[in-house]
Image (tube, grey):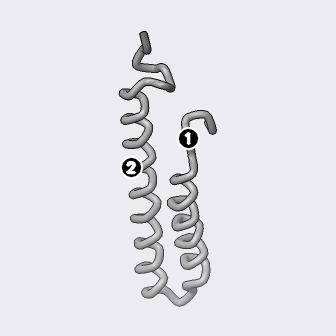
Amino acid sequence: MATPMDKNSDEFQRGWDAALLAARYWHEGKAKQAIIQSRHTRFPKALEREAEVHRHSAEMLLTLGPDDV
């Protein structure tokens, strides 16, 4: 019988998927925030790079599985 912390259980998979989705949304939100801030500053390049890092992080989260951590 699988326990809730067993990486093969349905409950664990649902929790894993929810955590990755939340992290992805957070990174996407930070990317949008950085882009908006970059439009209102005299030095936008640093914020544009920050936005790119967050976009890349959001994309990379899709490739993670429970065995990767």
Q: Position of residue 27 (x, y in %)?
A: 46, 60
Tag 2 residue:
22
Please give the name of the residue rendered at 46% of the width and 78% of the height, measured from the top-left corner. Answer: 35
Front position in the image: 37 or 30: 30
Tag 1 residue:
65
Please give the name of the residue rendered at 41% of the width and 73% of the height, measured from the top-left corner. Answer: 32
1 or 2: tag closer to the N-terminus: 2
Please tell me whether mark 2 sits on a helix, a strand or a loop.
helix
Mark 1 against mark 2, which lies toward the viewer? 1
Please tell me whether mark 1 sits on a helix, a strand or a loop.
loop
Please name the amino acid that badge 2 sits on.
Ala
Q: Is residue 60 above or below residue 6?
A: below
The CA distance from mark 1 to mark 2 is 15 Å
Quadrant in the picture for the C terminus? top right
Q: Is residue 49 above or below residue 53?
A: below
Front position in the image: 27 or 46: 27
